[in-house]
Each structure stands twice: as C-alpha cells, then as structure tokens.
Image (tube, coloured by chain):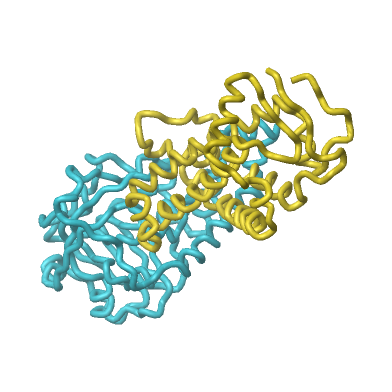
Chain colours: A yellow, B cyan
Amino acid sequence: MASETSDVVRAGAVIHPLLVRVCHWVNLVAIVIMVLSGWRIFNASPLFDFVFPRDITLGGWLAGALQWHFAAMWLLMANGLVYVLYGLFSGHYGRSFFPLSPRAILRELVNILHGRLSHHLGTYNPLQKMAYLSAITLGITLVLSGLAIWKPVQFQELATLMGGYEGARWVHFLAMVGLVGFALVHVIMVLLVPRTFLPMIMGRAPRVAKDKEH
Amino acid sequence: MKERPPRVIETLAGMPAGEIKLIERRLFLKKSLSLGSLALLSGCDVTNADHVQKLLWSISRWNDKVQGWLFDPNKLAPTFPESAITRPFPFNAYYSENEAPEVMAEDYALELAGRIRERRSWTLPELYALPEVSQVTRHVCVEGWSAIGKWSGVPFRHFLEQVGADLTAKYVGFKCLDDYYTSIDMATALHPQTQLTFKFADQILPTKYGFPMKLRIPTKLGFKNPKHIMAIYVTNMYPGGYWEDQGYNWFAGL
C-alpha cells in the first residue's frame, strides 16, 4: 500500500499532550473492563439469539460482572469527563478534529480505495477526524444509554429519549458494537503505521528517520 | 433469576449472620475463579485477589449510597395502559415454577417485628379489607429483561403508618416462605408506588406470582420485590438479602 509519510511536525515536537496520553491509557483500562463485564451481563438476558463466549467475559457470574461494570463506570465517566472538558476548552478538539467536511471525508475514502493511505504524524486526515469524533460520540452515547438502563425511573426522561428502557438496551448494545469496531480498526492502523505508537506514550515525534516501508 | 446459587446457602438460615457472611464470601470468591481473558492477558489472577474482591464490594456499598442520593421520593415510575401488559408474565425465582411454595390461605398470618408499635399478626381477610390501589408498571430484572404487569394492593406507606412502624428507621426487612429474604431502605418503603400486593391482573395472586402477597416496588429491580411474605420487620441494623449477600447490589434502584 502506498503511503505518504511526510510528517508535519519536526522530530521531538509534542504530538499528544500529557493529559490526552494519560486519559487514553486510563480509558483503555476502563473500556476493557466495561466491555468484558458488559458481555457477561448481556449473556444473562441476550437481546437476540447470541451469547459471548464465557471465557472472554469478566466477572465469573452475573453479580461479579455487575460489580465490575458498576465500579469501572466511575473510572470511565471521571476520565471521560476530564478528557472531553480538556478537549473542548483547551482548543485540542478544535485544532485536531476541525475543519471537517463530508467532501473531504469522501475524497479521503477515494484515496484509500486507490491504495493511497496517507498518514502524517501530528495531524489527522479527514477520515481519522471522523473516526475519532465518532468514537467520542459513541462513548458519550454508551454513558447516556447506560445511565438510562441503570436508572430508568430516576432518569426516565433520558430513557424516553432512547426509546424507553428496552430501547436503551439496544442503543447501549449497538454503541458498544460501534466502539469495539472502532477499537479494532484503531489497533490495526497502529500496526500498519507503527511510528504512531510511541508518541501516545512519550508524547513526542520520534527522532529517528521517517519510515518509508509503507 | 435463572442463575442458582449453591444450595448450601439455603440451609444456613439459622446460623449467625457473621458466619453466613464468611461462608458466602468464600463461595463468592470460588465462583469468581473462572475469569476470562483479562486474567489470561495479564498472566496472573489479578481479578480474584482478595483485595480486588474487597474493593469491588466496597464500591458496591458506595453505589448504595449514591443511589440513595439519586432516589427522588416523589418521582413516579412510568405507568402504562393495560394493553401494554406482557402476557404471559414471566415466572422468576431462584427455583423452578413447580417448586413455588403453597400457602394455606386459612392458616396464613403475617408476622410483624422490630420497630413497630402494633406487632400483632394479620390474617388475609384483614389485609384484603385495606384500601386498594392498582398500578401498571414495568418490572425490570437484574438480568436485563423487563415485563409490564398490573398489581393491586394497599400502598405500603399506608400499612406502615397504620401499624405504627418507626418511619425514621433505616430498613424494612422481609422474610418469605421460600426462605427468600431481602430488605429495602425506608425512603423506598414510603414511596407512593411501593405496594403490598394481593392481586396480579385483577386476580388474587397465584402461587407462581407470590401468593398470598408480595411487595411491588416499581423503583427497584425485580429481586427487591419479595414474594410469599411471611414476616415484615423494621430495623436500623442492615438486614442484607438472599442475593445481596452473594454480591448483588443492595439498593438496586431503578
């Protein structure tokens, strides 16, 4: 696959601010616990004729899975709140995800179909912008639908918005599918463009020569 | 709930609470032993470590408190038209439907205990003579499924006031014929929709739905709605519950 690798940042420049990096890895822990325990909870009363293999779920039985789920939700929500507030008010979102137009997304899609995968450290192409914005939206949807399922009486207005208690279960499930799908693509892309990995830990663009192997 | 706990627990009814807790904890820890990929990935049984289990239990206690704060004593659970009632309404217990306990109506007497002024027992005709209200509400199971039903009986608050219960006490506990037991917070006990229920779908409660009476709480998960109630007591000592003592969240509010 042909790939443009001209990075727009000089080596050593900060790509991911410290707070974004901390939130990213805390989020990974929270999401893994939420998803694996969520699968065990799903299995107790599946929405359709499917259950997740027991061995890849967390909690051992329903009560254990619920304990994990309702413990990790605090980590997920606190971390998510810090991240979103930072993104909104520091200008991080404004700089990283915008401007974004449907036309630009379409053009990027055509590029990819032609085998041109562009990746520049320090800036996102329109598809990446869309993917990360979708992930954030899915995360917020998961939290809101989760609250509606947890408290369909106290938060009944929220539940109504999701199509009632049963509707909220579907929204919660489908948003999980979307987020897990994002995570898979996300990991595959990091494997395809490995020089993006270290900056999410160290924060800076690598000082080594740019890789040209793609 | 469809998942059965180890049968041992059912035979422990007479033991001191402390001992029961210890045994149940051990059972709970055993149950958590078959954990999934997280344990495999990390290469150790981090999820079963005693301190992890302790942490999860204490967060669950914290979640009880949070739910107590979130609980609005005046917020009503959504109600539905009778056309929305789920038919047939699912049977649910820790045993199968044909194991539901039979109660002889003429021998039945509801026992009252604890912080209640008039602790005499109540016969069924006396209970049936109490003012009746009905509700069509959603029953939500901890497993995730839900069903809409119609329940009729006396507002629990009315009953508690009539027998002179200490409404400032923390908990109301229930003991049931099927060895089930549970307890709720006083705020929920006094909620306008919390109902001492004698009828389901306008018929005297059939055995499978909890004859002669159940407590219907549309603001709590299904397992907080005890059936076949034999005794009600008011207390300031945390009474726990059948599922709660095994790890299910105690407040379990909706």
Give the position of the C terminus of chain B as an image quadrant: bottom left
In the image, residue A107 above or below residue A175: above
Q: In the displayed structure, would residue B32 be above or below residue B127?
A: above
Residue drawn at point x = 18 percent, y = 42 percent:
B88
**For residue B231, side relative to residue B6 (left or right):** left
Residue A211 percent location from the top left of the image: 81, 25
Q: B54 or A189: nearer the eye?
A: A189
Q: Looking at the image, which is closer to me, B102 or B11? A: B102
Answer with the quarter of the image where residue B122 lies: bottom left
Q: Looking at the picture, how far across and down is residue A120, in whole percent?
A: 74, 34
| Image label count | 0
Q: Position of residue A145 (x, y in %)?
A: 44, 50
Q: Residue at x 18, y 50 (%)?
A: B85
Residue B59 lies left or right of residue B238; in this view the side is: right
Q: Is residue B104 visible?
A: no
Question: Residue A6: which quarter of the image?
Answer: top right
Horizontal side of residue A110 vs B107, given as left or right: right
Answer above or below: position of B4 versus B206: above
Residue B137 shows in this picture = yes
What residue is rendered at 54% in x and 29% in y? Answer: A55
The residue sitting at 57% across, 21% down in the picture is: A113
Q: Position of residue B145 (x, y in %)?
A: 33, 44
Please name whichever residue, B141 or B96, is drawn nearer the observer in this view of the structure: B141
Q: Is residue A165 above or below residue B75?
A: above
The N terminus of chain B lies in quadrant? top left
